[in-house]
Image (cartoon, rainbow, N blue to C red):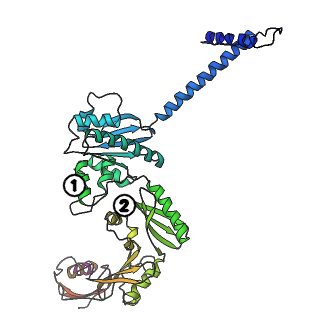
């Protein structure tokens, strides 16, 4: 190559000389200059070649994991330009499909093998393609490109077929479902749309269905399958925090994405944001990033909520039974339940399409009164107005037999303890007990909620 380059330089010089004025001395290029120029040219060509090779290597780097589900399930490693770098079988059916397969696949060629093996047909006409990638832009590009490739194959080979594309939901629950039932994260992300929608729509039941059956269930129940989930949950949290700053003029202190839900005809990331003045719940569209629903309430401290519950239910602090004392805190003997503080209960609540966001901004206070009543008091967290007061009945933690056992143990009695006392009265959270053992009579006063002995003596 070096000789050819020198020869090329020699070819150029005569032309330059011929263009010179007649009578001028001919210009000769030193051999050292010729070799230097050739060396530089070779170096430039080498650098360009290395650059193109590097670009090719970058293009072929794994950018996303893609799950392709029909009934056979496959895991693909894909570059950011949509080239399939590897294909792995995720179940036995998929191994059958890949047996004796080619070295390189496209979405179309892989679907062709699936169809040839009888897994894609008029009866089983649906394929699910799910992209798992942290980069939102790359996810959108791959969903569009690979989805178009799948649609083109179906248009030509199975016109009535369905190609569903989505982004894998970045939620711990997806990984749990996939691991528990041995299905792909894509299938787990898809079936979550149906869990709890109807009686019998449980994870156990839905995980056993193929993609075609899941699609039909979605259609029967009005659940959209056109959910690409282009937005990740961390981005949804950022959008919700921005919404609090711009609409409530409050600085967010924390943001919690409870999970993905189908709500109001859209796939949403439901997110709670707590600021210094407000607590707010946002539904952020998982496709567009638009805030489509927002509820907020003023933050009140625990004592303020409890005061409002007691007075709103028509009681005073003296009417409430003392349940327990820990570190002499004034209100520790009352029970407070704020739904948004209980993740598991909330997750089940949020999985319903008809979930009422107003319920997240309700504080429930459970009160035990001295006469044994158990009350559920629901307050509006913002206005402190009473929404409902329900009396659930009378509840004590001990019964008559428990009281006898507690008193006899306190008195050190182990023989001759009667099954029933002479008298036992439950009132105002107090158990007043009289019983006889081996001819001796005992009188005990016991806390009916905690079972603690308030007083006890032998009276005869």
Quadrant in which the N terminus appears: top right
Q: Residue furthest front?
A: 22
Which one is in front in this view, the residue at disc 2 or the one at disc 1? 2
Total tally of numbered discs in the picture: 2
| Relative side of 185 to 242, left or right | left
Quadrant in which the C terminus appears: bottom left
Pick the front one: 121 or 229: 121
Asked where in the image residue 3 lies, by quadrant, the reply is top right
- Going from N to C along the chain, the mark reached first, 2 or 1, is 1
Badge 1 crowding class, 10 Å Cα cut-off, few under 14, some 14 to 19, many 20 or more, is few
Per the rendered image, the range of residues in magenta is: 404-408
Measuring 36% from the left and 44% from the top, which residue is drawn there?
A: 147
Horizontal and vertical percent for residue 323? 36, 80
| Relative side of 448 to 382, left or right | left
Q: Which residue is mark 1?
A: 205
Taken as a whole, is the magenta stretch helix, strand or loop? helix
Residue 173 lies, with reference to residue 31, above or below; the image says below
Asked where in the image residue 352 lies, by quadrant, the reply is bottom left
Residue 288 lies, with reference to residue 281, above or below; the image says above
Q: Which mark is residue 266?
A: 2
Q: Secondary structure at mark 2?
A: strand
Badge 2 crowding class, 10 Å Cα cut-off, few under 14, some 14 to 19, many 20 or more, is some
Residue 333 in view of the camera:
no
Q: Secondary structure at mark 1?
A: helix
Estimate the spatial distance between the alpha carbons at disc 2 and disc 1, rounded to whole Å: 24 Å
Pick the front one: 167 or 309: 167
């Amino acid at each position: 190559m070096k000789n050819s380059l020198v020869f090329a330089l020699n070819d150029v010089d005569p032309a330059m000389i011929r263009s010179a004025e007649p009578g001028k001395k001919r210009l000769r290029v030193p051999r050292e200059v010729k070799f230097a120029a050739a060396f530089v040219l070779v170096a430039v060509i080498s650098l360009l070649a290395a650059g193109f090779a590097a670009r090719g290597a970058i293009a072929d780097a794994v950018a996303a994991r893609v799950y392709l589900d029909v009934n056979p399930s496959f895991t693909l490693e894909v570059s950011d330009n949509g080239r399939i770098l590897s294909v792995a079988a995720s179940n036995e059916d998929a191994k059958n499909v890949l047996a004796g397969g080619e070295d390189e696949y496209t979405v179309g060629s892989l679907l062709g093998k699936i169809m040839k093996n009888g897994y894609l047909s008029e009866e089983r006409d649906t394929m699910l393609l799910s992209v798992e990638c942290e980069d939102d832009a790359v996810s959108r590009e791959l969903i569009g490109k690979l989805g178009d490739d799948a649609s083109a194959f179906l248009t030509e080979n199975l016109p009535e077929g369905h190609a569903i594309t989505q982004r894998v939901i970045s939620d711990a629950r997806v990984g749990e479902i996939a691991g528990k039932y041995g299905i792909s994260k894509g299938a787990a992300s898809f079936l979550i749309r149906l869990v709890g929608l109807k009686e019998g729509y449980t994870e156990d039941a839905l995980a056993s269905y193929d993609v075609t059956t899941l699609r039909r269930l979605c259609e029967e129940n009005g659940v959209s399958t056109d959910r690409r989930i282009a937005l990740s949950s961390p981005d949804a949290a950022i959008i919700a925090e921005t919404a609090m700053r711009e609409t409530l003029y409050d600085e967010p202190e924390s943001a919690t994405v409870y999970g993905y839900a189908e709500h109001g005809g859209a796939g949403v990331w439901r997110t709670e944001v707590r600021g210094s003045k407000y607590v707010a719940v946002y539904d952020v569209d998982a496709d567009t990033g638009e805030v489509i629903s927002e509820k907020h309430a003023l933050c009140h401290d625990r004592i303020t909520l409890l005061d409002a519950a007691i007075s709103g239910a028509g009681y005073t602090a003296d009417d409430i039974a003392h349940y327990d004392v820990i570190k002499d805190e004034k209100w520790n003997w009352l029970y407070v339940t704020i739904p948004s503080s209980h993740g598991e209960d909330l997750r089940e609540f949020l999985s319903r399409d008809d979930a009422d966001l107003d319920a997240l901004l309700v504080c429930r206070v459970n009160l035990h009164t001295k006469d044994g009543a158990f009350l559920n008091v629901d307050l509006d967290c913002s206005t402190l107005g009473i929404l409902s007061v329900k009396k659930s009945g009378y509840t004590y933690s001990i019964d008559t037999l428990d009281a006898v056992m507690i008193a006899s143990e306190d008195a050190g009695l182990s023989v001759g303890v009667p099954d029933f006392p002479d008298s036992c009265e439950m009132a105002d959270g107090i158990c007043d007990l009289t019983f006889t053992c081996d001819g001796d009579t005992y009188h005990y006063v016991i806390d009916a909620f905690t079972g603690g002995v308030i007083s006890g003596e032998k009276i005869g």
